């Protein structure tokens, strides 16, 4: 008799509907899911009024259910779109931060150039007078070229600096000897001998080393911010796989079909779903972290003194022209703030599963035993998978072919490698060219900013310092120009110097 009772109870348990928390055999009303389903904009024509057998379901557990296969498909598509929306939102937040840092750093650099140019205009107008006012284009060309280089233009920095000193020498020779008829051939000859006669001393070489090192770093840093934002934008638009869509449906809306809409997914269950869905994205982590580390090193080792390098240009140029100006004021950029924000982004790709699960997974006392595990309210037993595609081979929630990585994401991993390599080159003093690194034909690889409000005009706006004071020659400086009664033209002295140098050879 006892065995018959046990058998009867077992039979009852097998035939009883799987109703989540309510173990009753009476068909339950589907009013809640109908209200939810209709509220999402779906038609209720095929939505059952009460529970039906769930053998037809393709994603959710096949017990008694309030969902038809059509409803299951609609909710699966919705869960996928919602997930893709969350990924785009998370990506936009990172893009906004990177674009903001790019805009701030670019604006800071442009402000340094403007202030430096304004300082030069003020000091040179009063010091060199007519000589400066007649040759302002030489100086403005230099500053515009420096701006164009740093902001991604096709500018050869070494040629720009060499050309500046050559032009300056030509102008000085002409102004000091304009009473003589000096042809263009002669002036060109003089400029070509600049390395031999070294009229500006060591200043051109020293200034070139400092400016090149600083602007290389600034240019590569700005391009690193642009490339990082591009990678985030492109990866955030990668569509989710069908397997991920099914897993998201099972985790998000199958509880509604089972009549337990308040059940939140178990934390480890949510982690496995997200790690499976974002397996390819997690593979960005190594190169992403490497790029961020390199940008921080560049910022801390090459950009801290950038303001002093740029703001001291007038003084260095004036020294080369045997004149000194007052000390240049300096305002330090908050490089530390930029590097701090970059460090916060280091683990972005492997942190996404945790971020996306933080608001949806069950938390609190006893949550592990009452959470949704993909089948019912109970503890989730499988272990949490590691990060990346290779670690998803045994993911119990998302079916993934680990031999078929997403090609868009692989391309972005290569972009991160290229950008990191060029940043390291800049750190070591080698010039970089970012114009061929973008796989986007619309192209922002040449230094364009992703923010539409970020100006790309390399022109400078120098502060007006009032009208120039004209002098026929620079003010007398006996240590430089010698006696005012000097009768031998400067051109003759220059020729004698060249002749002596040739004899010494």
Image (cartoon, rainbow, N blue to C red):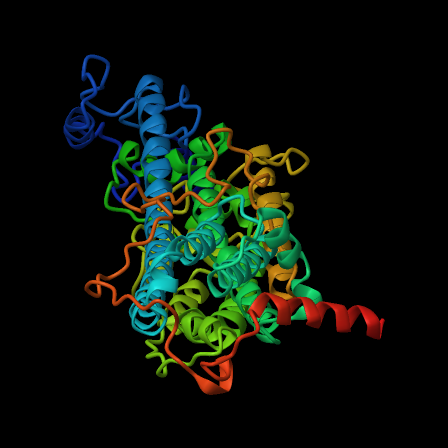
Residue drawn at point x = 30 percent, y = 35 percent:
258
Residue drawn at point x = 36 percent, y = 19 percent:
69
Outermost residue, top side = 45
* 330 relative to 402, above or below: below
Q: Is residue 165 visible?
A: yes
Outermost residue, bottom side = 479
Q: Where is residue 380 in the image (x, y as percent from the top left)?
A: 45, 52
* Left or right of residue 417, residue 332 in this image: left
* 38 relative to 272, above or below: above
Q: Where is residue 336 in the image (x, y as percent from the top left)?
A: 40, 73
Residue nearer the viewer, 167 or 129: 129
Residue nearer the viewer, 77 or 314: 314
- Quarter of the N terminus within the rendering: top left
* Left or right of residue 378, residue 49 in this image: left
Residue drawn at point x = 52 percent, y = 74 percent:
320
- Numbered circles on residues, count: 0
Q: Can residue 380 be seen in this view?
A: no
Q: Where is residue 438 in the image (x, y as percent from the top left)?
A: 54, 38
Q: Where is residue 319 in the image (x, y as percent from the top left)?
A: 48, 77
Residue nearer the viewer, 233 or 5: 233
Residue drawn at point x = 63 percent, y = 72 percent:
493
- The answer to which image quadrant residue 330 occupies is bottom left
* 252 relative to 191, above or below: above
- Quarter of the C terminus within the rendering: bottom right
């Amino acid at each position: 008799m006892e065995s018959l009772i046990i058998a009867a109870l077992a039979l009852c348990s097998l035939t009883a509907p799987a109703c989540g928390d309510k173990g009753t055999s009476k068909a339950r009303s589907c009013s809640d899911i109908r209200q939810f389903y209709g509220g999402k904009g779906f038609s209720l024509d095929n939505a059952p009024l009460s529970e039906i057998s769930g053998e037809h379901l393709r994603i959710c557990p096949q017990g008694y259910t309030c969902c038809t296969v059509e409803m299951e498909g609609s909710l699966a598509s919705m869960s996928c779109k919602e997930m893709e929306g969350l990924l785009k939102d998370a990506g936009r937040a990172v893009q906004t931060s990177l674009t903001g840092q790019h805009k701030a750093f670019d604006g800071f650099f442009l402000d340094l150039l403007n202030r430096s140019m304004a300082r030069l205009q003020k000091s040179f107008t009063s010091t060199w007078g007519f000589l400066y006012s007649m040759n302002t284009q030489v100086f403005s060309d230099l500053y515009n070229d420096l701006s164009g280089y740093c902001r991604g233009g096709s500018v050869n920095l070494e040629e720009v600096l060499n050309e500046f000193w050559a032009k300056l020498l030509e102008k000085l020779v002409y102004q000091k000897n304009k009473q003589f008829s000096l042809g263009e051939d002669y002036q060109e000859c003089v400029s070509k001998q600049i390395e031999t006669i070294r009229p500006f001393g060591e200043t051109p070489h020293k200034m070139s080393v400092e400016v090149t090192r600083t602007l290389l770093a600034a240019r590569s840093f700005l391009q690193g911010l642009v490339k990082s934002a591009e990678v985030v934008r492109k990866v955030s638009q990668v569509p989710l796989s069908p397997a991920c869509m099914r897993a998201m449906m099972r985790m998000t809306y199958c509880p509604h079909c089972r009549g337990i809409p308040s059940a939140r997914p178990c934390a480890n269950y949510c982690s496995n779903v997200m790690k499976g869905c974002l397996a390819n994205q997690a593979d960005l982590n190594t190169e992403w972290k490497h790029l961020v580390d390199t940008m921080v090193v560049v910022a801390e080792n090459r950009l801290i003194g950038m303001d002093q390098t740029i703001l001291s240009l007038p003084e260095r140029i004036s020294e080369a022209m045997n004149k000194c100006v007052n000390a240049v004021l300096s305002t330090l950029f908050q490089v530390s703030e930029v590097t701090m924000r970059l460090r916060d982004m280091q683990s972005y790709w492997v942190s996404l599963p945790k971020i996306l699960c933080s608001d949806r997974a069950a938390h609190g006392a006893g949550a592990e035993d009452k959470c949704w595990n993909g089948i019912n309210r109970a503890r989730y037993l499988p272990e949490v998978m590691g990060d990346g595609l290779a670690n998803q081979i045994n993911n119990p929630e998302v079916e993934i072919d680990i031999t078929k990585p997403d090609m868009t994401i692989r391309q972005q991993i290569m972009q991160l490698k290229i950008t990191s390599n060029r940043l390291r080159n800049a750190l070591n003093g080698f010039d970089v060219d970012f114009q061929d690194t973008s796989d986007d034909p619309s192209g922002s690889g040449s230094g364009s900013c992703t923010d539409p409000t970020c100006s790309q005009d390399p022109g400078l706006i120098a502060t007006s310092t009032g009208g120039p004071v004209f002098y026929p020659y620079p003010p007398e400086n006996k240590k430089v120009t010698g006696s005012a009664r000097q009768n031998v033209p400067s051109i003759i002295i220059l020729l004698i110097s060249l002749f002596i140098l040739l004899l010494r050879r």
